[in-house]
Amino acid sequence: MTPEEKIWLEQAETAVAGASILSNESARDVSKHALRELFKLTKNNTEQSLNLVRQIKDFSARRHLMEMFRRTLVEVSSSNVPAILLDTGSLTDPIFANKFDRELLNLWRSIGKEPKKFEKIVGSFPNAARVRILNRLNSRAFKRRRKIHYVVDNSLFSDGGSNSKTINLLTLLIFLIFLSILFGDWF
């Protein structure tokens, strides 16, 4: 064990155990931060990181670190996974559901809308997140929302900032019709 790993062990155990006294949520946040540092230290070596977490003597600190281990590993090792897909928020909350669906739709599109590739990527997620994502992907609400986003995103309002040729042509045509109505007497 290197000196940096010993320092990490001491600091992580103290920080997570102290945070667990306050609340489970704060202990999870501290665990996530400690695990990110651990993964940097071990260069994302899963076995080495897991062995270091197992060496923590405080039960509550080790439990919180183990609880967040897989989720943090997925976040650190995969650059295209949005954190909201791993969150435990409620899909009944419209704001959370919109953000969740938007990120799920972006991930679905980036994979090429292929279910096998999608299941392979989501397979590395923690169990609860994986089940939730697959259930949401197959739900009626998401399929309806996906169709609406497809129509809006890919037709006239392609990406908001840049105008398509169709929009420019329609705008010019409307402008000419408006001018002919206004100044129809002068032509």
Image (cartoon, helix red, strand yellow):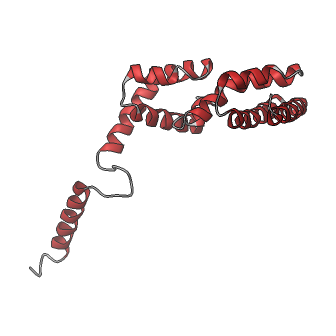
Visible residue check, residue 51: yes
Residue 101, given in percent of the width and then of the height, sits at 50, 34
Visible residue check, residue 90: no
The one nearer the camera, 76 or 154, is 76
- Spot the residue most to the front: 2
Residue 57, given in percent of the width and then of the height, sits at 89, 21
- Spot the residue most to the bottom: 186
Residue 18, given in percent of the width and then of the height, sits at 90, 33
| Residue in the picture at 65% in, 27% down | 45
The one nearer the camera, 123 or 53, is 53
The one nearer the camera, 75 or 105, is 75
Q: Quadrant of residue 73?
A: top right
| Residue in the picture at 24% in, 62% down | 171
| Residue in the picture at 85% in, 23% down | 56
Relative to residue 84, is residue 80 drawn left or right?
A: left
| Residue in the picture at 37% in, 36% down | 148
In the depicted structure, whether residue 155 falls above or below residue 21: below
Relative to residue 41, is residue 59 drawn left or right?
A: right
Relative to residue 79, is residue 50 drawn left or right?
A: right
Q: Quadrant of residue 9?
A: top right
In the depicted structure, whether residue 164 falls above or below residue 6: below
Q: Quadrant of the N terminus?
A: top right
Residue 100, given in percent of the width and then of the height, sits at 54, 34
The one nearer the camera, 19 or 53, is 53
